[in-house]
Amino acid sequence: GAVVSQHPSWVICKSGTSVKIECRSLDFQATTMFWYRQFPKQSLMLMATSNEGSKATYEQGVEKDKFLINHASLTLSTLTVTSAHPEDSSFYICSARAPGQGWQPQHFGDGTRLSIL
Amino acid sequence: SQQGEEDPQALSIQEGENATMNCSYKTSINNLQWYRQNSGRGLVHLILIRSNEREKHSGRLRVTLDTSKKSSSLLITASRAADTASYFCATEPGGTSYGKLTFGQGTILTVHP
């Protein structure tokens, strides 16, 4: 079945560092991917919609300059947390929907746990 | 974004018992989906119910949808210890917002062997 791979799975870094998270669709092409953020014991909040070949669409309240999204190919979207601070520590998850006739479920990566010291 | 509510927030049962989780949402939807998340992992899609459907079954899962009350329920029958996870409902709108999921707060299910 369709698989979405996310890398890295865990990042620990110092405050002020920029961190890049990759989301790959392994066996299908995804023109659209989604990035979510999840705080401990809470739900997922949609951050942005990543569109291949065009600018990402950000949800209200999400800083575009803080969370840079690049969807340069049909199988890869990246989320860069720029100048990360402790409040950016969270679990980041991407998803993509495989193409096909009719409705297809979204496939989620295993997430990236980001810890900023 | 709007978040739906789920109850209970946590549910603890014995193996073999049934588990029921409820979800409410606020806006009109194209469909409602249920996902499972094991601790620290991504989400796995369980079942989808369309806005014009009232009930759906898949193995030990049964989902109901009441669009007049904007609510859904997920029933897991004959639960197993391996069912221990967090369960989220997610609504998907139609139109230009297709694909953008709004998740409920989730129910943490613990099944004791």
Image (cartoon, rainbow, N blue to C red):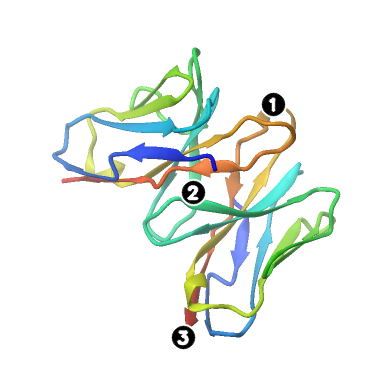
Q: Chain of mark 1?
A: B
From the viewer's perspective, is B40 left or right of B20? left
Residue B11 is drawn in which quadrant?
Answer: bottom right
Mark 3 and mark 1: Cα distance apart in space: 45 Å
Q: Secondary structure at mark 3?
A: loop
What is the number of the mark on residue B20? none
Q: Which residue is mark 3?
A: B113
Image marks 3 and 1: residues in contact by CB distance under 8 Å: no
Residue B96 bears which disc, if any?
1
Using a 10 Å C-alpha cutoff, classify the residue at mark 3 as few (fewer than 14 neighbours), some (14 to 19) or many (20 or more): few
Question: In the rendered structure, the residue with mark 3 lies on which chain?
Answer: B
Can residue B27 be seen here? The reply is no
Specify the subunit that label 2 lies on.
Answer: A
Do the residues indicated by labels 3 and 1 lie within the same chain of the protein? yes
Q: Residue at x 17, y 31 (%)?
A: A17
Which residue occupies the foreground of this view, B7 or A26? A26
- Are the numbered discs 1 and 2 placed on the same chain, yes or no? no
Count the labels in the image. Answer: 3
- Please provide percent x and percent y for residue A10: 25, 46
Q: What is the distance, in whole Å, between disc 2 and disc 3 at their CAs?
A: 29 Å
Mark 1, other Cα within 10 Å: few <14 / some 14–19 / many ≥20? few
Mark 2 = which residue? A44
Q: Does residue A115 sit above or below B14 in this rendering? A: above
Dot placed on the residue nearer the N-terminal end, 3 or 1: 1
Nearer to us of marks 3 and 1 is 3
Residue at image x 82%, y 54%? B67
Give the Cα separation between the discs numbered 1 and 2.
21 Å
Instruction: Give residue B26's position: percent from left, percent from top.
Output: 70, 50
Left or right: B93 as drawn, with respect to B45? right
